[in-house]
Image (spheres, coloured by chain):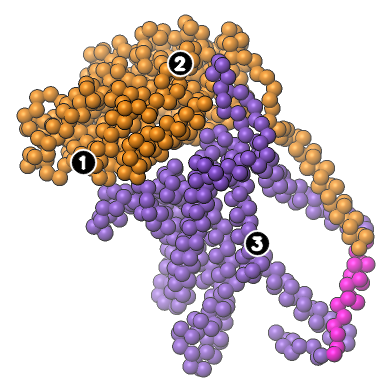
């Protein structure tokens, strides 16, 4: 028996010592709470030149690669390497955060979705940019607003996106309606007239994106903003328990109740809506500009090619308010080559490069002047309408805990449009949840 | 199969006399050598199982500060909150979510494993017969199991979308991917489709070692098909079936990718504990995410222990070893007699 015990003692001792050694080697420390350099001090000194990494979502058009190649040719000592992240936005965010949390210097320049701006800035995962870093006066104001956290610019707007209102111009004409609807009431009247037409049998009036997803947050924000409300105010305090927000949410709730939206629109994301519109099942649709090309395809895949047109989304009293999509570039505080990073961001987001990228990429630039260039408009006919939409756009709620915020919004808005809760209860619960999250 | 008769009564087998002799042979040097040889394995296990587990438990006792300071920055500190992350699972909004997820996880586990077992058994019975093209059927039945879960989730998403095949064939307008019982049904159908072949093949393997003579004897005695199934096939495949069901239960309790891809994250009707833990960590609330993961781990562990202890699922073949050693002892006892 004694011998047996000794065996176990040896076993334990050997294992324990090896474990200690291994843990020490891998450096699995606990959470460090050491003070960081304040971002203000860091902002004052963008120093250090050398190679950097640009980490971004995929650019299938190759336009971003071209810009980087041009930079690398001019700066052989400060080469930029393109690091591609997964397609899923959630996974991109996760990787970016993981790298920031371990203060890794691998990621130098980050390509951030506009809704992540506040979270990254508040956690000091990105640096405030110098005031003169980017020509903000030439950019669409909403894009600059979206890249700003508490009055300091933390990202350089790269590309942007806004809502478009697609409508069947042929049916409008057949029903004798001269101009596309500017308000929800006008849209209802137009639908009543159009759906009475024999060629419109079996069609529905309108759809947006209502599945429980980020897209629902977008559609809810637009409805609320179009009714004159907001989700959070300028100080970041939630304001969804208001008459305006109620009016906005009721647009969507009533749309389902009154049969204005197809009943399966509750499962629609961008793609399902596109298919329904393309198959001629819808008169009106709110969607993003990227669909324009496939809807106007003349190879027979689209039944509505040449039969539709676009305008700004409707509101309650006038044109509606679009939310803002898009991306901006930010600089990590953990990269040693901050001077190069800043120069690269300036170069990448310059008007000249934005114009060059337009030849390849359909992503909308942030410079208003580029939307009106006749050569560009000939290729992308939706640009002037998109500019109108963007000039009137609002960012989604700028809150630090955006992930939990959008979740709470989806939860309550979904409950309201499916009829599980009435509008008042849903908005009251949403207000309570958001208040908790923005404390 | 040689000693079918029990040792005669009154004659005590003397295993005690054999034991010390064996022990004495093992010297201290040998023991040390054994420990040395085993330690790399123990070390690897400690690093990949014990350390993450302890780290998760440790993390679950902390919570990150979410408040902003005057300049709008997040304080980068985590404070020790004791068991508050666990206590929160039973109160308020987070409690409602946790209990919902726990209910979903249990519901999915019970329904899918039950249906899979029944279906898998039927598949195995069908495949166990000799007919032309049997090997082809066996190979093709494996296809659903070979498809990655995320891909099968996408496949079923197409089938279940509002204008998809499921609704077209049934002539219905069910919104399978919206919140509600239809989405639960969709997950169960897809999960059963995917994993019934797994049970089917394991059970088939168990059936094929049943000697044909047993059935012949039963036939001679006039037992019908049902009698053969109930008295021969099922009792003899029970050990295999129990292991298969145990594996499936442990898998189903951790279900994540199928509801995530098929129905989508954040849908309460299908949110499982794994999805909840993922979502919490995605919101950077690592403390409560770890707490959920620890609870899920305990849940899985309890189910496994109950299965092994109460139902006697023989996972490692320990029973067989015991039987063999018992037989050896008996033989030795007889020899010494």
At mark 3, the secondary structure is helix
**Can you say which quadrant of the picture contains the N terminus of chain A?**
bottom right
- Mark 2 surroundings within 10 Å by alpha-carbon count, few (fewer than 14), some (14 through 19), many (20 or more): many
Q: Which residue is mark 1?
A: A258
**Residue A334 in view here:** yes
Q: Which chain is purple?
A: B
Whether tag 2 and tag 3 are in contact, CB under 8 A, the answer is no
Question: Viewer-nearest of labels 3 and 1?
Answer: 1
Magenta stretch in the rendered image: B10-27
Q: Quadrant of residue A316?
A: top left
Residue A42 belongs to the span the image colors magenta? no
- What residue is disc 2 on? A148
- What residue sits 55% from the left and 60% below the top? B249
- Disc 2 with disc 3 on a shared chain: no
Q: Chain A is which colour? A: orange
Q: CA distance from mark 2 to mark 3?
A: 54 Å
């Amino acid at each position: 028996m004694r011998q047996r015990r000794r065996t176990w003692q040896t076993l334990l001792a050997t294992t324990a010592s090896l474990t200690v050694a291994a843990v020490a080697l891998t450096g699995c420390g606990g959470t460090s709470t050491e003070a960081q350099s304040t971002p203000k001090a860091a902002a004052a000194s963008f120093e250090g030149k050398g190679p950097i990494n640009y980490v971004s979502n995929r650019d299938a058009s190759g336009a971003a690669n071209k810009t980087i190649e041009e930079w690398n040719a001019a700066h052989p000592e400060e080469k930029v390497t393109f690091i591609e992240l997964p397609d899923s936005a959630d996974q991109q965010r996760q990787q970016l955060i993981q790298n920031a949390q371990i203060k890794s210097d691998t990621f130098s320049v980050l390509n951030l979705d506009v809704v992540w701006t506040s979270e990254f800035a508040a956690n000091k995962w990105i640096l405030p940019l110098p005031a003169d870093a980017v020509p903000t006066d030439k950019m669409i104001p909403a894009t600059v607003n979206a890249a700003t956290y508490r009055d300091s610019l933390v990202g350089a707007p790269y590309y942007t996106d806004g809502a478009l209102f697609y409508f069947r111009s042929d049916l409008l004409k057949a029903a004798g309606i001269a101009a596309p609807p500017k308000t929800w009431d006008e849209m209802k009247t137009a639908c009543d007239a159009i759906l009475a037409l024999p060629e419109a049998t079996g069609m529905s009036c309108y759809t947006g994106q209502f599945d429980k997803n980020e897209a629902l947050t977008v559609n809810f924000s637009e409805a609320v903003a179009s009714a004159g409300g907001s989700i959070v105010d300028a100080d970041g305090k939630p304001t969804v328990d208001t008459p305006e927000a109620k009016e906005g949410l009721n647009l969507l709730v009533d749309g389902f109740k009154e049969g204005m939206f197809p009943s399966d629109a509750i499962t629609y994301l961008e793609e399902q809506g596109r298919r329904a519109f393309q198959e001629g099942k819808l008169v009106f649709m709110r969607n993003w500009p990227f669909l324009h090309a496939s809807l106007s395809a003349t190879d027979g895949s689209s039944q509505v090619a040449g039969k539709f047109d676009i305008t700004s989304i409707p509101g309650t009293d006038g044109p509606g308010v679009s939310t803002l999509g898009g991306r901006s570039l930010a600089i990590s505080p953990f990269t040693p080559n901050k001077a190069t990073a800043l120069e690269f961001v300036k170069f990448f987001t310059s008007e000249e490069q934005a114009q060059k990228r337009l030849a390849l990429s359909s992503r909308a630039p942030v410079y208003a002047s580029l939307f009106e260039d006749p050569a560009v408009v000939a290729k992308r006919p939706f640009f002037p309408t998109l500019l109108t939409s963007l000039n009137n756009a609002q960012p989604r709620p700028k809150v630090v805990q955006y992930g939990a915020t959008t979740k709470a919004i989806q939860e309550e808005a979904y409950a309201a449009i499916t009829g599980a809760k009435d509008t008042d209860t849903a908005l009251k619960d949403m207000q309570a949840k958001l208040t908790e999250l923005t404390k | 199969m040689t000693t079918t008769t029990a040792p005669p009564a009154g004659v005590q087998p003397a295993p005690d006399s054999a034991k010390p002799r064996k022990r004495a042979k093992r010297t201290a040097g040998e023991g040390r050598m054994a420990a040395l040889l085993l330690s790399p394995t123990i070390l690897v296990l400690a690093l990949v199982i014990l350390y993450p587990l302890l780290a998760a438990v440790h993390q679950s006792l902390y919570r990150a500060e979410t408040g902003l300071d005057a300049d709008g920055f997040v304080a980068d500190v985590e404070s020790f909150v004791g068991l508050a992350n666990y206590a929160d699972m039973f109160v308020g909004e987070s409690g409602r979510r946790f209990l919902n997820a726990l209910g979903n996880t249990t519901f999915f586990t019970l329904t899918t494993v039950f249906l899979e077992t029944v279906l898998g058994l039927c598949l195995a019975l069908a495949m166990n017969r000799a007919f032309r093209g049997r090997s082809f059927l066996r190979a093709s039945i494996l296809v659903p199991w070979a498809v990655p879960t995320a891909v099968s989730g996408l496949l079923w998403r197409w089938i279940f979308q509002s204008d998809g095949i499921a609704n077209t064939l049934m002539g219905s307008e069910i919104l399978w991917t919206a919140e509600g019982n239809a989405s639960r049904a969709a997950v169960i159908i897809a999960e059963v489709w995917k994993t019934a072949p797994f049970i089917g093949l394991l059970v088939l393997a168990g059936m094929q070692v049943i000697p044909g003579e047993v059935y012949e004897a039963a036939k001679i005695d006039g037992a019908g098909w049902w009698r053969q199934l109930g008295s021969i096939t099922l009792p003899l495949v029970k050990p295999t079936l129990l292991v298969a069901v145990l594996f499936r239960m442990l898998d189903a309790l951790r279900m994540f990718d199928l509801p995530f891809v098929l129905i989508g994250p954040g849908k309460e009707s299908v949110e499982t504990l794994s999805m909840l833990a993922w979502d919490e960590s995605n919101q950077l609330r690592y403390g409560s995410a770890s707490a959920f993961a620890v609870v899920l781990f305990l849940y899985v562990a309890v189910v496994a222990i109950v299965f092994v202890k109460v139902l006697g699922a023989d996972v490692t073949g320990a029973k067989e070893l015991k039987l063999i050693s018992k037989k050896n002892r008996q033989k030795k006892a007889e020899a010494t007699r």
